[in-house]
Amino acid sequence: MPWIELLIAGLLETAWAVSLKLSHGFTRLWPSVLTVAGMAASFAFLSAALRRLPLGTAYAVWTGIGTVGTFVLGAVLFRDSVRLPQIFCVLLILAGIVGLKLLTPQ
């Protein structure tokens, strides 16, 4: 269960990061509301996962999921520039997430 909570926390981190971009510096109401709500929910799920997972592992996985998700959604939704070396680096982050999951008891 803590890994599912951590996955949800990471996905919510991705959601609030996208909402933050859409808020245009908190000048648009609903994207700003979604950003703050997403942050609160993401932290709540991270906090729940931290009850049973090591801090370093949970935080690294949480930020990794957010990083990979934000990178992908930035490319898809905002047509951010993506080059092969960037994809390679994101794959390294993804490998780190999987490695931490496989090497952490729970």
Image (tube, helix red, strand yellow):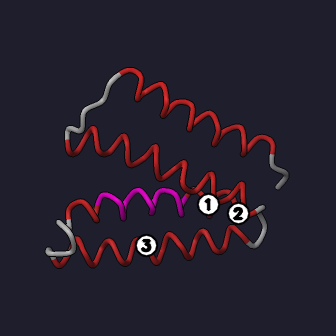
Place of residue 43 in the rendered image (x, y in percent of width and height, measured from the top left): 54, 73
Q: Which residues are magenta?
A: 8-18
Kindly identify the amino acid type of the residue bearing the numbered disc 3.
Answer: Met
The residue where tag 3 is placed is: 39
Distance from Cα at disc 2 to Cα at disc 3 = 18 Å
Which numbered circle lies on residue 2? 2
Is residue 32 covered in magenta?
A: no
Height in image: 80 above or below 69?
A: above
Place of residue 83 in the rendered image (x, y in percent of width and height, measured from the top left): 32, 24
Q: Quadrant of residue 76?
A: top left
Distance from Cα at disc 1 to Cα at disc 3 = 14 Å
Distance from Cα at disc 2 to Cα at disc 1 = 6 Å
Kindly identify the amino acid type of the residue bearing the numbered disc 1.
Answer: Leu
Where does the N terminus fall, quadrant-wise?
bottom right
Give whichever of discs 1 and 3 has the lower sequence position.
1
Tell me if label 2 and label 1 are in contact, CB under 8 Å.
yes
Q: Is residue 68 left or right of residue 36?
A: right
| Callout 3: SS | helix
Query: Which residue appears at 64% of the width and 38% of the height?
Result: 96
Which numbered circle lies on residue 6? 1
Height in image: 25 above or below 7?
A: below
Place of residue 55 in the rendered image (x, y in percent of width and height, measured from the top left): 73, 63
Which numbered disc, 1 or 3, marks the residue closer to the eye? 3
Specify few, some or many for label 2: CA neighbours under 10 Å numbering under 14, 14-19, or 20 or more.
Answer: some
Place of residue 78 in the rendered image (x, y in percent of width and height, measured from the top left): 20, 44
Where does the C terminus fall, quadrant-wise?
bottom right
Kindly identify the amino acid type of the residue bearing the numbered disc 2.
Answer: Pro
